[in-house]
Amino acid sequence: MRPCATVTSHPSTSPRAAALNPSPVPPPAAGPWRLLRPLLFRLDAERAHQLGVLWGSSGLAVWLARLAGGRRGADVARAPELATRVMGLSFPNPLGIAAGLDKDAQAVGFWQALGFGFIEVGTVTALRQPGNPRPRVFRLPEDGALVNSMGFPSAGADVVATRIERLRQRDLLQVPLGINIGRSKVVPAAEASADYRRSFERLGELADFVVLNLSSPNTPGLRDLQAGDQVQAIVSALQRPNQALSAPKPLLVKLAPDLTDAEAVGCARAALAAGCAGLVVTNTSLDFSAVAADTAGLHGGLSGRPLFARSTALLKLLRAEIGAGPVLIGVGGVMDAASATAKLAAGADLIQLYTGLVYGGPSLPRTLLGELPARVMAGRGASKQ
Ligand SMILES: Cc1cc2nc3c(=O)[nH]c(=O)nc-3n(C[C@H](O)[C@H](O)[C@H](O)COP(=O)(O)O)c2cc1C
């Protein structure tokens, strides 16, 4: 494993990689990010990320990000044609922060001020845990990609719940908040349902929607939980406490892009049959064949531009298979307005990004939203009040 976190391109890029990832240049950076990005990219990727989250948790960062959005009525992120209503929730726009960026809900106000229309925090585990040894995040700049093997470092459900309780009490949330929960590493697979239930009982009431992460490649055995009977068992275990809430929360299952089409459809059907509102498509991939960089020695989940083709194909397939009703959140390789538009056209109600923000910087959400064609937004979400 390389000590430094940036991997450069391999001279003999495979034809498949070239076909799937046709632009072997780093994604563009605009404004001050053009100057800041090269400096941050000298640091270990996780260290740079932590600095970003630390900055985002400061009042100054939130104030500056709000200032960049301009007056509320003139903010492109709140343009009326972007408003989206799904799962009974109102989203000012359909672009959200993907899970993993703010695992412990430390900078929620900042993501909101950058213009994101919703936030998914987590993955949160019931028990506090450190995750895998470092280094565990790697940049592949010429692929516009990251590889991570974080393994759910989490402050644990209690700490995250306390943070969100504070946000709720002070009425600081203006966009829907999703909470992504995952299995604690020390809990055996056979006890997964009870572990998810424990997280849900602490966090469910505080969320606008809850995502069950069954698809991270970095927790041994987690992806086996995507088998139909396992999905049904876990969702059913949560539905009992969920239905006891004054307003039950929409539950979504997050899928891996490495499932076969048939497996993904089977998992989706099992989740919906157990009462889920929809699916998040997709998590990171173990398939590096669309990557130009030399990935020898790297292990973990791939995100960013090389993930776009598979995650979008799966999204399109699932929309065709499950029909218009269930909610689909499209994530994987959203880097700009073109890739965001393609996700929406493939059937996503909402979209998310992580890697795009690392390369595009904090102005990306508003730039992207400002370039979303009005025709893409017309009539969306009307059937999912
Ligand atoms: C460093 C890193 C950490 C991540 N952590 C999580 C996580 O804790 N839970 C989760 O469901 N997804 C996690 N993801 C996956 C993202 O939420 C997203 O599904 C994936 O990165 C594809 O989107 P992107 O191409 O926009 O990055 C992580 C991704 C990265 C790059």
Image (tube, helix red, strand yellow):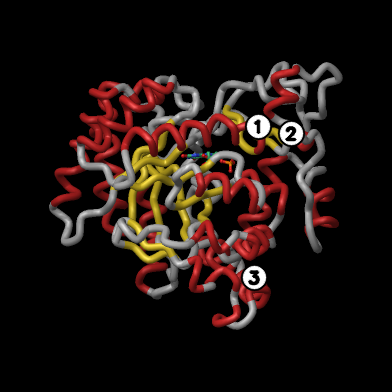
**Label number found at residue 380:** none
Callout count: 3
Q: Nearer the viewer, mark 3 or mark 1?
A: 1
Location of residue 199 (image quadrant): top left
Q: Amino acid at mark 1?
A: Pro
The residue carrying mark 3 is 65
Q: Amino acid at mark 2?
A: Asp
CA separation, marks 3 and 1? 29 Å
**Residue 5 visible in the snapshot:** no
Residue 124 image point, x, y percent: 41, 44
In the image, residue 277 sits, relative to residue 129, either above or below, namely below
Residue 272 image point, x, y percent: 25, 38
**Element assignment for label 2:** helix
Residue 120 image point, x, y percent: 45, 52
> 187 or 94: which is nearer to us?
94
Q: Amino acid at mark 3?
A: Ala
Left/right placement of residue 324 relative to residue 28 reads: left
**Label number found at residue 306:** 1
Sequence-wise, the earlier of marks 3 and 1 is 3
Determine crowd level at label 3: few under 14, some 14-19, many 20+ residues with C-alpha closer than 10 A.
many
Determine crowd level at label 1: few under 14, some 14-19, many 20+ residues with C-alpha closer than 10 A.
many
Q: Are marks 2 and 1 in contact (CB under 8 Å)?
A: yes
**Label number found at residue 143:** 2
In the image, residue 329 sits, relative to residue 151, either above or below, namely below
Location of residue 189 (image quadrant): top left
Q: Is mark 2 within 8 Å of ligand 1?
A: no
Q: Which residue is painted at 31% across and 37% down in the image?
A: 322
